[in-house]
Amino acid sequence: MRRALVALATFLCFGCQAVRPRPAAPAPPPLRVALAEPLLDLWVEGAGGVTPEETGQALSASRAALGGALDGRGFVAAADADHLLVVREQAVTRTAGRRQQQAAAVAGIVLLVAVAVVLVAIASRGSGSGSPGRAPAAGAVGRTAPPRGLAPPPRLPVGPPAPWFGWSFDVGFHFPVPVAGPPMRPPELPPTLEGRLGARGFLAGDETELVLELREAASGATVWSRRVSGEADPRDPAAVRALLDRAAWDQAWARGPSPGA
């Protein structure tokens, strides 16, 4: 009887209690990021020289491509931001004369390889069609005949000398030009392209390197940084935007505001 009363009292006290799920923690607010003045370091490679016109055109196109790649990212004014994005770009581009010079060099190398293959084929054909040796004539002194059945050593055909292709190249000018002004302070993650310029070969193409750093606006402490590089023409807006997307693919602020914002 006592157990029945205890069970009834327990049911009356706790039987009507509903289990309520714990509410989910609210999502953190999106970062409000302001853009510091990006810095552009540009090298121009020419065929024997770089004219001021080529320099100006490359610099203007590279600045426009970098600015276009940063557009539409949802940056806010510096007064309303809690984070600051610092961007630095180092790039190498080539003039039209340099590109033509490289194409001519590649064509010359292909021609030399083709001539060498033809010479080897002729030499191998000549070595397989020999004639049997002959005995020395009577009275010949000081000569020895090759063993019977062995062909004399083949003679390689001697033709005109192969064409020679030469080239020269010139590294143009270095332009540390800010897009809108100097950054707040140099990035903590330095770029590396400038140190690799000496290792570039004659047939090297365009190259672009981006360094991104996200800093707290109040303290200036770096909370995120990344460096990417690729064979991208710094004057090509689509190539620079694709490189920037690859650098910040996992950052929500880099995708810009949502369509409903």
Image (cartoon, rainbow, N blue to C red):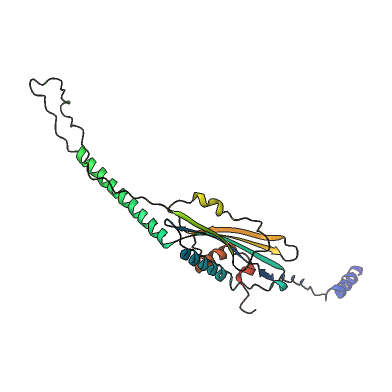
Horizontal side of residue 168 vs 69, given as left or right: left
Toward the bottom, the furthest residue is 260
Q: Which residue occupies 42% across, 58% down?
A: 98
User: Residue 225, how many percent across, how many down?
Assistant: 64, 59
Q: Is residue 38 above or below residue 261?
A: above
195 vs 21, nearest the viewer: 195
Report the quarter where the C terminus lies: bottom right
Q: Which residue occupies 46% across, 64% down?
A: 54
Residue 152's image quarter? top left
225 vs 188, nearest the viewer: 188
Q: Could you tell me if residue 108 is visible in this image?
A: yes
Horizontal side of residue 37 vs 121, given as left or right: right
Report the quarter where the N terminus lies: bottom right
User: Residue 70, how many percent across, how many down?
Assistant: 58, 69
Horizontal side of residue 152 vs 67, given as left or right: left
User: Residue 20, how many percent across, how many down?
Assistant: 78, 73
Q: Which residue occupies 62% across, 59% down?
A: 226
Horizontal side of residue 86 vs 124, given as left or right: right
Q: Is residue 81 above or below residue 247?
A: below
User: Residue 99, how many percent across, how many down?
Assistant: 41, 59
